[in-house]
Image (cartoon, rainbow, N blue to C red):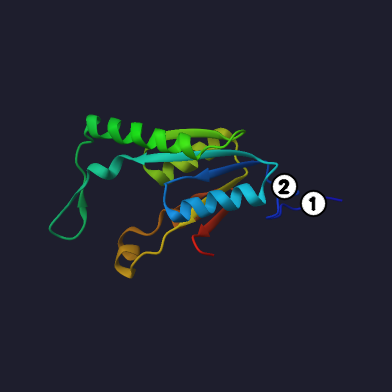
Amino acid sequence: MTHSPDLHGTTGFQRVLVGVDFSASSAAALALARARFPGATRRLVHVTDARVTAAPDLMGGVTPALPDPTLLHTLESADGQRLTREVMVGEEQELMVGDPVTGLLDAARAWGADLIVVGTHAQGAIEHFFVGSTAEKIVARSPIPVLTVRAGQ
């Protein structure tokens, strides 16, 4: 008899990648991954968003600017320290720089994850229309299952 993956960690998911962005939703996703998949190998991945150097333009969008290497290095260093504080014994960690969606999907593929767990954030309608959500984009592009978690649920 074959067993299908479930959300209780008894079968199926053995390599669980958790996207960490230090938000309340991310903390909820991490707590759920630890509770539901205690026997799985967990890898916490944070992507320092290289787009932080984009500037708002007059039309309401953003104009990309050349990344400031000093700013990116400072952000990456601070994010690395925060990520290290989140990791528990037996968990792995990975810090990347770039676009969070692409970074998490690339990390999941390279590591061989069989599940991605990410937090979702409430957004206003206008923000959602223009940029969508990171979690939504991951769900749309991921070849493996994605579990989304909202803080307070």
SS class, disc 2: loop
| Drawn side of residue 8 relative to residue 88, left or right | right
Locate residue 8 relative to residue 107 in the image: left or right.
Answer: right
Residue 89 circle label: none
Q: Is residue 53 above or below residue 146?
A: above
As shown in the figure, which amino acid type bears the numbered disc 1?
His
Residue for badge 1: 3
Residue at image location 75% in from the left, 53% down from the top: 4
Question: Where residue 97 sits: x, y (%)?
Answer: 37, 35
In which quadrant will I find the C terminus?
Answer: bottom right
Mark 1 or mark 2, earlier in chain: 1
**Which percent across, then down, holds residue 72?**
28, 34
Residue 12, disc: 2
**Label 2 CA crowd tier, 10 Å (few <14, some 14–19, many 20+):** some
Query: Could you give the CA–CA distance between mark 1 and mark 2, rounded to whole angstroms?
Result: 7 Å
Is disc 1 placed on a helix, strand or loop?
Answer: loop
Tags 1 and 2 touching, CB below 8 Å: yes
Q: Position of residue 61 (x, y in %)?
A: 21, 57
> Would you place residue 109 above or below residue 150 in this image?
above
Q: Amino acid at mark 2?
A: Gly
Is residue 6 in sight in this rendering?
Answer: yes
Q: Is residue 85 above or below residue 20?
A: above
Q: Residue at x 38, y 37 (%)?
A: 79
Front one among 11 and 36: 36
Q: Is residue 146 left or right of residue 136?
A: right
Viewer-proximal residue among 28 and 95: 28
